[in-house]
Image (tube, rainbow, N blue to C red):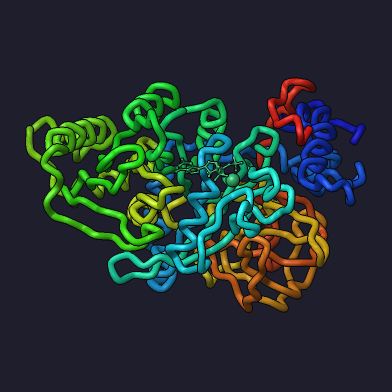
Amino acid sequence: MSKIDVSSPRCYTTSVSRFASSQQRYHRMMFANFTKLIPLKNLSRCGVSAVSHTSKRSARFFHSTVSRKAYEDEKAVLDEMTSQLPEEDVKRASRLRNIGISAHIDSGKTTFTERVLYYTGRIKAIHDVRGRDGVGAKMDHMDLEREKGITIQSAATYCSWEKEGQDYHFNLIDTPGHIDFTIEVERALRVLDGAVLVVCAVAGVQSQTVTVDRQMKRYNVPRVTFINKMDRMGANPWRAIEQINSKLKMAAAAIQVPIGAEKELQGVVNIIDNQAVYFEGSQGEKLRIEKEIPADLKDLVAEKRATLVETLADVDDEIAECFLDEVEPTVEQIKSAIRRATIARKFTPVLMGSALANRGIQPVLDAVCDYLPNPSEVLNTALDISNDETPVNLVPSSSLPTVALAFKLEEGKYGQLTYLRVYQGKLKKGSMITHVKSGKKVKVARLVRMHSEDMEDVDQIGTGEICATFGIDCASGDTFTDGQVDYSMSSMFVPDAIPKGRSNFPCSLR
Ligand SMILES: Nc1nc2c(ncn2[C@@H]2O[C@H](COP(=O)(O)OP(=O)(O)OP(=O)(O)O)[C@@H](O)[C@H]2O)c(=O)[nH]1
Ligand SMILES: [Mg+2]
């Protein structure tokens, strides 16, 4: 840890001094029973790749930051790439979404995710965080998480959602909200294609919302926004939307208007197609859709529709034309514009409801399908080491050489669990993969999909997907290939540690 290449850019030089403290602190929190503190010499394996390496070869991991190319440039490359993809790959990718749930602490991410798992049929019953019923929410599986009612580590799961007769497959990561665990958000956003930003309807944009927004911008992650806790007294989605526009400098407009407020919250009016959606049944699982919207909401819906079109006109040429010609855009035009502008990270559509009261979750899943990108709509690059580190675009095709990134490591009962995102090609159980940094070949003895702490064995993982494997010696941020190419993906950013005494983490956990 002592040899530092001072010529390296900021993310390298600054990371070393704060690395030990932030990682030690992190692991103290993560493994709060203190049974297994990770030795200092192993710290580099738990956070960023190869902090202690000083050779030219390893230094490259810190030279490359995530591409900040203007989206228009990316789009041209992506269109060209997609036009050459086999139809099967395009079809597969179009049904896949890798999303994160991120927000300020306690805004309801885990409560929201619990409903997602229930409505997609992944769990049979809804349980609350903190485990008052002795069970606890699925994604907060650590004892400490259940005891304290907070998320400490991000947890991954996958589920399927049917929309208009098509099955969509989601890889979903529920991230923690507290600043002390922000590295977990960083890890997740590094590999996700889109996110649901959860904002509390009462508190609005909070300090950690700003941090998460910065992280989403750093990794070019498009988002849909869900204003949660609409059942609470003082809920005001319009103030929250105004704050997203002003504080986060992100064009945002509601695509829904709530029906009823606080305890009387019954559903939402979809202002794009003017339909009312009511959430019925004991768990809000039955959707009643009415073409007639409540009479007292008609003016508000018309006003918010005008705001939506006006906001879209600022970020989308087609809607701008309609706006200037004073022509009312069609439902399809509005939906396409929202998709274009969201994927271009110029706009976020805002939905609303209450996760705890089981209101408004299903439309968010529809919005994820409609407006967030699939893996073939996001440009991912690597450096070709055998070609003087020339940047290369990774193509989400199953038939190309495999390139995968280890983005998260976890000490589990079977040893080190390594989370991987496959960017190109596919991963097969039993196959050999090459650890690019060391050149070592390792066997993929077991391949699993994570469902919080549960593992479901699979034989193969396709391009664009997220999985986990065991027994692979590597650091977080390392690249694996099938040996046909010598590509390395860029490293992730390590945020500054919080100065001692500045954390507002609950005293009981300090
Ligand atoms: N009234 C109300 N409370 C909610 C709602 N959603 C979540 N909560 C409550 O808010 C608290 C925090 O919920 P979590 O789901 O743990 O929030 P989180 O964002 O996952 O929290 P961290 O992961 O620790 O940042 C819990 O007590 C929930 O019951 C909601 O829609 N309405
Ligand atoms: Mg949580």
Where's residue 146, x and y in %? 67, 50
Q: Is residue 422 visible?
A: no
Q: Is residue 469 above or below residue 34?
A: below
Q: Residue at x 30, y 34 (%)?
A: 253
Where's residue 58, x and y in %? 79, 44
Q: Is residue 377 visible?
A: yes
Near-viewer residue (326 or 99): 99
The answer to which image quadrant residue 251 occupies is: top left
Q: Is residue 406 left or right of residue 364?
A: right
Where's residue 288, x and y in %? 24, 59
Q: Is residue 2 left or right of residue 486?
A: right
Q: Is residue 370 above or below residue 119?
A: above
How many numbered discs, if any?
0
Q: Is residue 379 left or right of residue 321?
A: right
Near-viewer residue (416 or 281): 281
The answer to which image quadrant residue 25 occupies is: top right
Quadrant of the drawing holding the N terminus: top right
The answer to which image quadrant residue 487 occupies is: bottom right
Quadrant of the drawing holding the C terminus: top right
Q: Residue at x 61, y 75 (%)?
A: 460
Q: Residue at x 32, y 29 (%)?
A: 238
Where's residue 91, x and y in %? 38, 69
Q: Residue at x 51, y 69 (%)?
A: 124
